[in-house]
Image: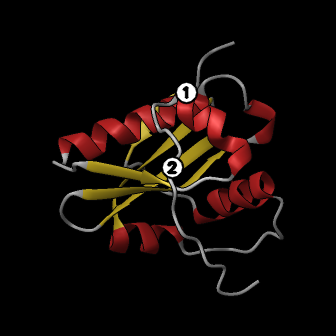
Amino acid sequence: MTPAVVRVRPGVDDVALSALHATAFGETPRLRPWSAQLAAHSLTWLDARDGDALAGFVNVAWDGDRHAFLLDLVVDPVRRGRGIGRALVAGAVEQATAAGCTWLHADFAPDLAPFHRACGLPPTDAGLLRLHR
């Protein structure tokens, strides 16, 4: 099995990324303008490719100074357990560090704490308010 290839700031296929996101999060598919959102709001983003297929993605947003935020970390459910998520997080850490960030924030559900801890991101207390459904 060939490992997935992680790329920094690749061109984004809005249709493919929207489909991956919906599949991985169990959501109804909807086309999102990923390219425009990333260009306007992100420090960087990374994807993982398994051959020609999009296998994973992470967005690194930031405050323009010292704080970076992991968002939209996703791995294709059929490709999980192969180190793709860890490779994406490691790449995000590297990119945020290179940009001079001091902090990398990551919010995650309690059941994902073991994965994030294994990536070097221990759980912390944080507030979260769902604004709409």
Left or right side of 38 for 13? right
Q: Up-down: is 108 above or below 40?
A: above
Task: Give the amino acid at mark 2.
Answer: Val
Q: Which residue is mark 2?
A: 58
Q: CA distance from mark 2 to mark 1?
A: 17 Å
Look at 54% across and 56% down and name the residue there. Answer: 107
Look at 35% across and 39% down and name the residue there. Answer: 93
Task: Give the amino acid at mark 1.
Answer: Ala
Q: Up-down: is 76 above or below 18?
A: above
Where is residue 126 drawn, in percent x and y?
51, 62
Q: Can residue 41 be seen here?
A: yes
**49 or 42, which is in the foreground?**
42
Where is residue 73 drawn, in percent x and y?
57, 50
Q: Earlier in the sequence, mark 2 or mark 1?
A: 2
**Label 1: few (<14), some or many (≥20) within 10 Å?**
few
Where is residue 3 drawn, in percent x and y?
59, 19
Q: Up-down: is 73 above or below 1?
A: below
**126 or 112, which is in the foreground?**
126
Look at 62% across and 33% down and name the residue there. Answer: 115
Mark number for residue 118?
1
